Amino acid sequence: MIRLDGVTKTYPDGTTAVDDLSLVAPKGRITALVGPSGCGKTTTLRMINRMIEPTAGTITVDGQDVASMDAAQLRRGIGYVIQHGGLFPHRTVERNVMTVPLLLGWDRTRARARATELLEMVGLDPAMAKRYPSQLSGGQQQRVGVARALAADPPVMLMDEPFSAVDPVVREQLQDEFLRLQRELGTTIVLVTHDIDEAIKLGDQVAVLRVGGRLAQAADPATLLTHPADPFVADFLGRDRGYRGLGFTHARLPIHPETTTPLGQPVGSVGDRWVLVVDPADRPLGWVERERVAGPVTKDDLALGGTLAPVDGSLRAALDAALSSPSRRGVVVDGDGCVVGTVRAPEVVAAIERTERPDAPDESPAPAGETS
Ligand SMILES: Nc1ncnc2c1ncn2[C@@H]1O[C@H](COP(=O)(O)OP(=O)(O)O)[C@@H](O)[C@H]1O
Ligand SMILES: [Mg+2]
């Protein structure tokens, strides 16, 4: 756990970058610090690993005051990732990842083995190990940056806009993998971003800062979206707040059985206008219009499918699946991607109506959908 108590940083020129900030970053969770440019996010992060010394207040990591620790030693125990990966340009990818283990006195064989393991863990081809950072794409460099920060298995990781320099598709991919990795490793993470969507996606807790380095609100994403503390936070959250809040709301929904047709089979002439086509494992491939298909269904007959809703997913996923489906029946899939049934938009809306607005958000996992 990282605790900031009344932390203030005033730079020598008189700029107060962080003002009386108190915040707890819980163990094994991701705390996202978010706010407009210049609100003191980077300053806050760098005070945690003592690259910047606070003017006032205390910071503890697992109960230990960082001011009383040796700064270099503290930093070796805390992973630090910055925009563009912050790699050493004159060192190979592998050597970059080996940096901290070598500083910690590991022998080269062990450090190299660890680097190989980590590069694989962050989804990089082993062939990249001998390349230099300039020979990698932005997304690949960012992965190396994460691998390097994880090298000595630090219990704490600080990340400063780690995904902002990559294009949106790669960013989404990196975010998903990062979340998986964090859940697996249980690292305590403080992540800085100016992107509220990223904060909401990645943060177990989101701390919104306003310029001047003052905390506007710290809450879990669902609470933030449904109960912003003030107009600044509401404004910063932006559009579709209510809809986005549904991304964190779970409720039981009626799941209707859906008759499916395997690819290569005829759809028959009786039944609903839209027919859901599946692969041999029962995974949805798309919808076809019954009248338009003569003979066995081929790939060319498929209309674009809607989004898929996981069976234990949010109301947002369920509603979107229904609204984006040509049949208006939202396809629900299980963990293997196989069709469970379909949901209807009015029934999702009815479920929303039944949901209490969370004053104290329910932490319990959502119940699996029931079959009607
Ligand atoms: N070394 C410095 N000297 C003076 N002012 C600084 C220094 N570093 C940052 N600042 C100022 O402190 C404020 C917060 O900066 P920073 O922590 O980098 O914000 P953010 O990361 O949220 O964009 C800004 O007004 C910035 O100009
Ligand atoms: Mg910054």
Image: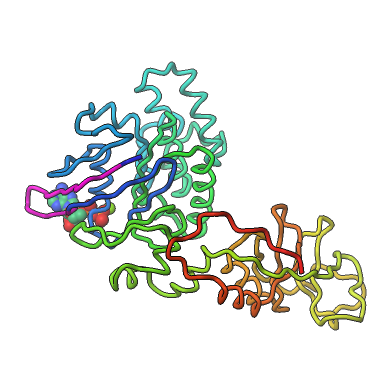
Q: Is residue 309 left or right of residue 20?
A: right
The percent position of residue 185, horizontal first and vertical second, equals 50, 37
Q: Position of residue 136 (x, y in %)?
A: 46, 44
Give the dominant element type of the magenta stretch: helix, strand or loop: strand
Q: Quadrant for residue 264, please give it.
A: bottom right
Residue 232 located left or right of residue 101 = left
Looking at the image, residue 368 lies above or below residue 74: below
Which of the colour schemes (rainbow, by chain, secondary structure, one colour) is used? rainbow
Residue 219 magenta-highlighted: no
| Residue 14, above or below 132 | below
Q: Quadrant of residue 328?
A: bottom right
Q: Is 14 contained in the magenta span? A: yes
Task: Please give left or right for residue 84 compared with residue 293 in the image.
Answer: left
- Residue that appears at 50% across and 50% down: 174
113, above or below 271, in the image: above
Q: Which quadrant, please, contains the C terminus?
A: bottom right
Report whether 177 appears left or right of 159: right
Residue 73 in picture, x, y percent from top left: 28, 26
- Boundaries of the magenta span: 3-19
Given residues 245 and 92, the one toward you in this image is: 245
Q: Position of residue 137 (x, y in %)?
A: 46, 48
